Image: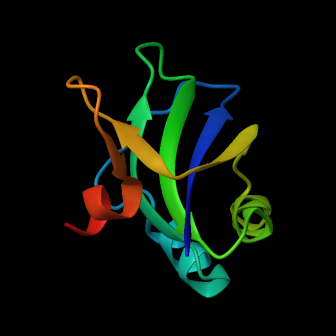
Amino acid sequence: MAIFMIERTFAEQLTPEPGAFHELNLINADEGVRWFYSFLSQDGLRTFCLYEADSREAIVRAAQRAGVPADLIIEVTQTVTPDGLLHPIADELVG
């Protein structure tokens, strides 16, 4: 499985609440997509999400079904730490 960073821009401020993404998680599971976590911009209009999926297309299908944007989808393979070392991203996520 590949790891992807997804940028989403929302028309209205996103205000997450516990349990608010249950339906999204069901859709993701149905499409074979796994959501690790997201960063939310200070204004609440953008998220930067880290996902695992077989393909970019699976993420697009899940986003369309859930009615959420997926403005930019980039496959990522490594992290860079402040010491300048590269690490496979899968190692960072699955420990």
Q: In this view, does 24 lie to the left or right of 39?
A: right
Q: In which quarter of the image is the N terminus?
A: bottom right
| Nearer the observer, 86 or 76 | 86
Among the 4 quarters of the image, the one containing residue 10: top right
Q: How many labels does the image show?
A: 0
In the rendered view, would you say 9 is above or below 2? Answer: above
In the rendered view, would you say 83 is above or below 63? Answer: above
Q: Which residue is drawn at 62% across and 86% down?
A: 30
Q: Quadrant of the C terminus?
A: bottom left
Q: Is residue 32 left or right of residue 61?
A: left
| Nearer the observer, 54 or 15 | 54
Kindly give the residue lying farthest to the bottom in the view shown: 30
In the rendered view, would you say 6 is above or below 52? Answer: above
Image coordinates for residue 74, horizontal then vertical, percent: 67, 45
Q: Which residue is drawn at 54% across and 24% down?
A: 13
Image coordinates for residue 8, horizontal then vertical, percent: 64, 36
